[in-house]
Image (tube, rainbow, N blue to C red):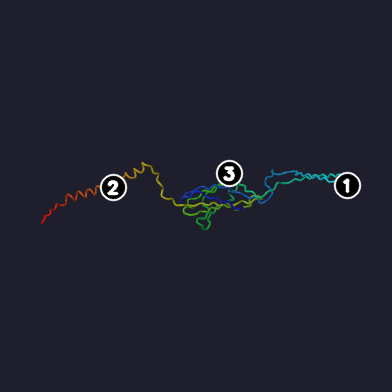
Amino acid sequence: MSTIVQFWGDSITPGDKPVFIFPIVANYTSLQTRDPTNTLDNFVSTLELTGSDIDGAVSLEGTDSESGYVVGGPQETAVGGQLGNLGVRVSSNGKALKAGLGVLGEISAGIYSYTLDSTETQEPGSLLIIVKPSNPTAITDSFICSTYLNCRITKPGIPLARTTPQSIVEAITSGPNSPLSQFENYVNQALNNILGNQMTTKPTFRKDS
């Protein structure tokens, strides 16, 4: 495996500067385990054979001794001290990769961090961050992996207000433009129109023929 892929779980607001935390790992390119203490000396095997012939039983016995290293397949191990060997490239919405403008740091024991610059999160959409070693074979018998970080930048929506019975009452009754005030104004205007018409309209009389 030559890459490590991680996804940022939350959406990022344009202009934010989130901090990514991730490991830089290396795969062993040699089957020999790099730990010099992990050895087994004097592998011992015992061979014992028993047979018979016409004259009687024949017993055969022998031993064999060997020593060597324990071997195994590739292993991923976090590697420290690679800050100067790492570079950052950033791509927004599939555009050409550009040099990262954020801050790359090492926390400890092969764990690193990258703080995005606010200019890298201005454009809504997908953002790809690649942390790649300039010399992937800087460690003997190992290959340092690249790390891919993926996140999404989203414009903030309309904030949802927390509603309570008190907040609902206040929304209806408070202020000159509240629904209650508007309703009161409507009723007052209607009454004024009715009463005003009654006061200004002259009475008429009908004469029966």
Q: Nearer the viewer, mark 3 or mark 1?
A: 1
Circles 2, 3 touching at the beta carbon (< 8 Å): no
- SS category of the residue bearing label 3: strand
In this rendering, would 97 be left or right of 174? right
Crowd around label 1: few <14 · some 14–19 · many ≥20 (10 Å)? few
> In the image, residue 65 lies at what x, y percent?
78, 45
Which of 195 and 41 lies nearest the eye of the viewer?
195
Crowd around label 2: few <14 · some 14–19 · many ≥20 (10 Å)? few
Three-letter residue code for mark 1: Ile
The residue carrying mark 1 is 54
The residue carrying mark 2 is 183
Q: Give the spatial CA distance, label 1 vs label 2.
A: 123 Å
The residue carrying mark 3 is 108
> In the image, residue 91 lies at what x, y percent?
52, 55
Going from N to C along the chain, the mark reached first, 1 or 2, is: 1
> In the image, residue 60 lies at what x, y percent?
83, 45
Three-letter residue code for mark 3: Ser
